[in-house]
Image: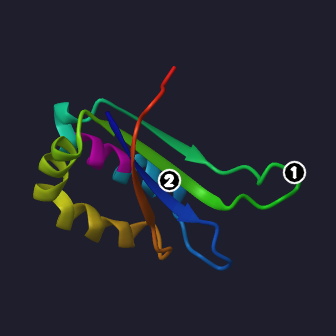
């Protein structure tokens, strides 16, 4: 299993429309990935471990797929649409990490 993580750094002055992201972009993405998507989570940063500290990321989204090939097959036909939609909710450059899940509970 692989996990695709999309991380939005907590950039000073960055724009992030939470309502649009949760109400439109996330459902759009989920619908486009279809049955290839095995699970997902969307997280909003709270702090960096210490009370009152700024979280390093405003949001993090994690998508689970059976394999890297399954992710590419699900994402690539919709890549342009999903990437263009990002401009509707943020001007923050997203970071992506693809990981192999070794342990899950």
Instruction: Tell me which label, 2 or 1, sits earlier in the chain.
Output: 2
Residue 19: which numbered mark, if any? 2
Figure check: 44 above or below 84 = above
Q: Residue 69 in magenta? A: no
When asked about the image quadrant of residue 38, the answer is top left
SS at mark 1 in the image: loop
Residue 50: which numbered mark, if any? 1
Residue 18 at x, y = what percent? 53, 56
When asked about the image quadrant of residue 97, the answer is bottom left
Which is the main secondary structure of the residues drawn in magenta?
Answer: helix
Range of the magenta residues?
A: 26-31
Figure check: 47 above or below 31 = below
When asked about the image quadrant of residue 15, the answer is bottom right
Residue 59 at x, y = what percent? 56, 54
Q: Residues within 10 Å of mark 1 (few under 14, many from 20)?
A: few
Looking at the image, the residue that sits furthest to the right is 51
Q: Nearer the viewer, residue 21 or 99?
A: 99
Q: Residue at x 41, y 47 (%)?
A: 23
Q: Residue at x 88, y 55 (%)?
A: 52
- Count the numbered circles shown: 2
Q: Residues within 10 Å of mark 2 (few under 14, many from 20)?
A: few
């Amino acid at each position: 299993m692989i996990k695709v993580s999309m991380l939005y750094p907590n950039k000073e002055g960055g724009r992030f429309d939470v309502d649009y992201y949760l109400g439109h972009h996330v459902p759009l993405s989920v619908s486009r990935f279809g049955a290839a998507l095995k699970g997902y989570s969307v997280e909003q940063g709270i702090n960096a471990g210490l009370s009152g500290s700024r979280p390093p990321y405003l949001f993090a989204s994690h998508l689970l797929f059976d394999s890297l090939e399954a992710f590419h097959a699900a994402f690539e036909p919709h890549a342009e649409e999903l990437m263009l939609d990002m401009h509707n909710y943020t001007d923050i450059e997203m970071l992506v990490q693809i990981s192999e899940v070794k342990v899950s509970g």
